[in-house]
Image: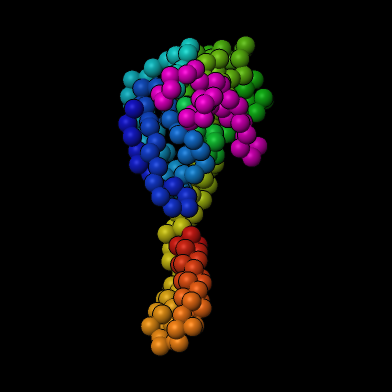
Amino acid sequence: MSVHRLERKPVGETSVDLCAGCRALWFDGFESAQLAPGSTLALLRAIHEADDAPKNTLAARLACPRCSGTLVLTRDLQRSTRFSYFRCERGHGRYTPFMQFLLEKNFVRPLPPAEIERLKRAVGTVRCSGCGASIDLVADTACGYCRAPIAVLDPDALSRTVDALTAAEARRNRIDAGALAEGLMVAERMRRTLAGDAPARRGADAIAAAIEMGATALDILFAARRG
């Protein structure tokens, strides 16, 4: 697996493992939900770049890379879209096929029954883009190995999701000049309070007031950073 260091919300970094051959991602804990918008876009690019790599069929048994325990198939729901992944029962993380990640993040959409019926008559069998297994459209409504539903890359949905993530990342990195100036003014008042010639008996009160103002300044700055 290749390691991708990505930004997470609200601050900090996380490491996500990507296997091009297995067409899957490994997330520790709740890393998938903590990805910053720009990080989700970075993984979309990485998934696209991995498309030419030789594809491995999903193994019958998947082991946790941390404890070697068997991973358990888990079904989840994101808004109205169902997706699945393989979860470590000890909480070490989850193994998510590419297609399931794209479903989770609204890059693709499941096909409605009517479209699946038309596909059955026209094609019959397709290969899962998530794990490479064959799907019999007559008998199956999802991949028998990774449980990826039959889905389609919807250009409109893809465009909307990319635009929304790009805008969210821009807001996340924009600093409000007014809030920053107000934060600096609060910090300056705090400095003057600490530097003042207050009587000794008022020293503790002055420090307490300074700490309170300092916290307010930090709140303003972090709020501006998140804005």
Q: Name the spot of residue 150 as percent of width and height, x first.
A: 57, 24
Q: Does the magenta stretch include residue 160?
A: no
Count of numbered tags: 0
Colouring chosen for the image of the structure: rainbow
Residue 99 in view here: no
Q: Give the range drawn in magenta.
A: 65-94
Q: Residue shown at 50%/20% (left/top)?
A: 71
- Where is 87 relative to 214, above or below? above
Q: Work out whether residue 64 or residue 83 is closer to the camera in this orientation and state it.
A: 64
Q: Residue shown at 47%/13% (left/top)?
A: 61
What is the quadrant of the N terminus in the image? Answer: top left
Q: Work out whether residue 94 or residue 110 is closer to the camera in this orientation and state it.
A: 94
Q: Residue shown at 39%/36% (left/top)?
A: 16
- Where is 211 relative to 44, above or below? below
Residue 89 in view here: yes
Q: Name the spot of residue 63 as percent of width and height, x first.
A: 45, 18
